[in-house]
Amino acid sequence: MNSRIIITGGPGAGKTTLITALEKSVFHCQPESGRAVIKQQMDINGDALPWRSPARFAEAMQAMDINAWYQAEQSDLPLFYDRALPDIAGYLTLVGEPIPNRLHRAINQFRYATDVIILPPWKAIYKQDNERTQSWEEAVRTYEAMREIYPRYGYRLHLLMPASIQERVNRLLGLINVILPSRK
């Protein structure tokens, strides 16, 4: 059974907050590669940034996501990912860049659980910061891009609506119990 669970959606939808809450429980989680790449590139004045070179930014995220896939610990518990490889294809589509064949191959080779959790835009909590420079409208378009790209790669999306963090964790865990078969 593949228990690598992706949590996706547009920026500012509460994904990272949800991942942080899951980490505080007993779950293993992989952080979002996009934010890490932006921070790293800003620290070194690099050009693999979404506003400088979307293609290089995508390549850096792809390398980081593949590395995270390999580093995943074997566990009886689900492993949650704050975005994953298909998000990169959604991002490239959103910015009008072609999806390279190597990314298509990686998405098909490095598989996650078929069922993916998607968080819709949530204006009440949306705010920009040093790594999240998108406008609210861009955040909504990013969500729509993820809704379109994941099914193209054979994934099923499950919507996790806005709620308090504890309610979202409880709903997510209830959903996981339904979509992941028992390991017994």
Image (cartoon, rainbow, N blue to C red):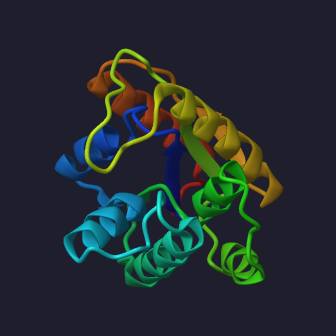
Q: Quadrant of residue 76?
A: bottom left
Q: Quadrant of residue 129?
A: top left
Whether residue 124 appears in this view of the structure is yes
Image location (x, y in percent) of residue 3 = 52, 62
Q: Is residue 97 left or right of residue 140?
A: right
Q: Is residue 136 left or right of residue 178?
A: left
Image location (x, y in percent) of residue 82 = 42, 54
Task: Between residue 42 and residue 28, name the one nearer to us.
Answer: 42
Residue located at (36% from left, 26% from top): 126
Residue located at (48% from left, 82% from top): 63
Relative vertical location of residue 44 with respect to residue 80 in this rendering, above or below: below
Q: Is residue 161 left or right of residue 151?
A: left
Task: Between residue 147 and residue 90, name the one nearer to us.
Answer: 90
Quarter of the N terminus within the rendering: bottom right
Exactly how many numbered labels are in the figure?
A: 0
Residue located at (74% from left, 81% from top): 105
Relative vertical location of residue 16 with respect to residue 141 in this rendering, above or below: below
Residue located at (60% from left, 37% from top): 143
Image location (x, y in percent) of residue 13 = 43, 32
Relative vertical location of residue 152 with respect to residue 1 in this rendering, above or below: above
Q: Quadrant of residue 107?
A: bottom right
Q: Is residue 133 left or right of residue 91?
A: left
Image location (x, y in percent) of residue 124 = 36, 15
Whether residue 78 appears in this view of the structure is no
Task: Between residue 79 and residue 31, name the one nearer to us.
Answer: 31
